[in-house]
Amino acid sequence: AQTVTQSQPEMSVQEAETVTLSCTYDTSESNYYLFWYKQPPSRQMILVIRQEAYKQQNATENRFSVNFQKAAKSFSLKISDSQLGDTAMYFCAFMKSYGGSQGNLIFGKGTKLSVKP
Amino acid sequence: NAGVTQTPKFQVLKTGQSMTLQCAQDMNHEYMSWYRQDPGMGLRLIHYSVGAGITDQGEVPNGYNVSRSTTEDFPLRLLSAAPSQTSVYFCASSYFNYKEAEAFFGQGTRLTVV
């Protein structure tokens, strides 16, 4: 069974600075997908960034980038130039790419990020 | 472009009452799922469906029932609500292939059982 671990329950960062959220996972699969979701106080689940395990290049989306270390099973999220609107709960999630229960997301417990002015 | 529509947004139930959370998607995805979110627990899978007429249990299925009569709709039924079912519920619709995948979520339902 797959597991996802987020070891930082809460973090804070000053506006305009950079912060990195950690995520590790455990799986015996060789192909899979990893995601970071943002959940602001509105409760909406918003996809921040996605990484396909078969891609060696780290994904980037504007101010958001990941450090994907497949051998170490690590998938950290870096937020550059933090903005007040980045304040939210962030979830790391894993999805198998084939086989039974493909499509099921396995979530970490989340990291609550506060951006301070 | 509605995506995933989930209703209601809020609900208060008395212990023992039943209710149905509605979920509909307009993206023609075969895969749909229900999660519950509890403080400090992340999101956990309740039930999922890989297509019309096919459903299966997730990690925390007890007390919930689902059916999938059409590709678009995937309702979640609470047969006899219990305080332990107080939670935030999310419906999701997903696509995936050998190259990419993505899950789209409804707005969530905050359910309180008293």
Image: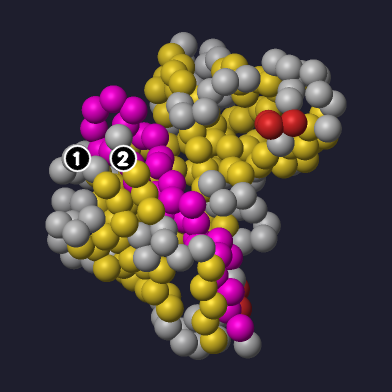
Q: Earlier in the sequence, mark 1 or mark 2?
A: 2
Q: Determine whether B69 is above or below A24 in the image.
A: above
Look at the image and say whether residue A101 sits in the magenta stretch. yes
Amino acid type, callout 2: Gln
Q: Nearer the viewer, residue B31 or A19?
A: A19
**Mark 1: secondary structure:** loop
Left or right, B21 with reference to A70? right
**A114 falls in the magenta region:** yes
- Give the quarter of the image for residue A51: bottom left
Residue at image position (58%, 74%) is: A114
The residue indicated by pointer 1 is: A29
Location of residue B25 in the rendering, given as x and y in whole percent from the top left corner: 55, 33
Q: Looking at the image, can residue A112 be seen?
A: yes
Circle 1 crowding by C-alpha within 10 Å: few under 14, some 14–19, many from 20: few
Q: Are marks 1 and 2 in contact (CB under 8 Å)?
A: yes
At horizontal 52% and vertical 82% (from top left) the residue drawn is A13
**Tag on residue B11?**
none
Q: Residue at x 39, y 74 (%)?
A: A20
Q: Please, which chain is the residue tagged with disc 2 on?
A: A
| Quarter in which the N terminus of chain B is drawn | top right
At label 1, the amino acid type is: Glu
Q: Nearer the viewer, mark 1 or mark 2?
A: 2
| Residues shaded magenta | A88-116
Which residue is identified by label 2? A2
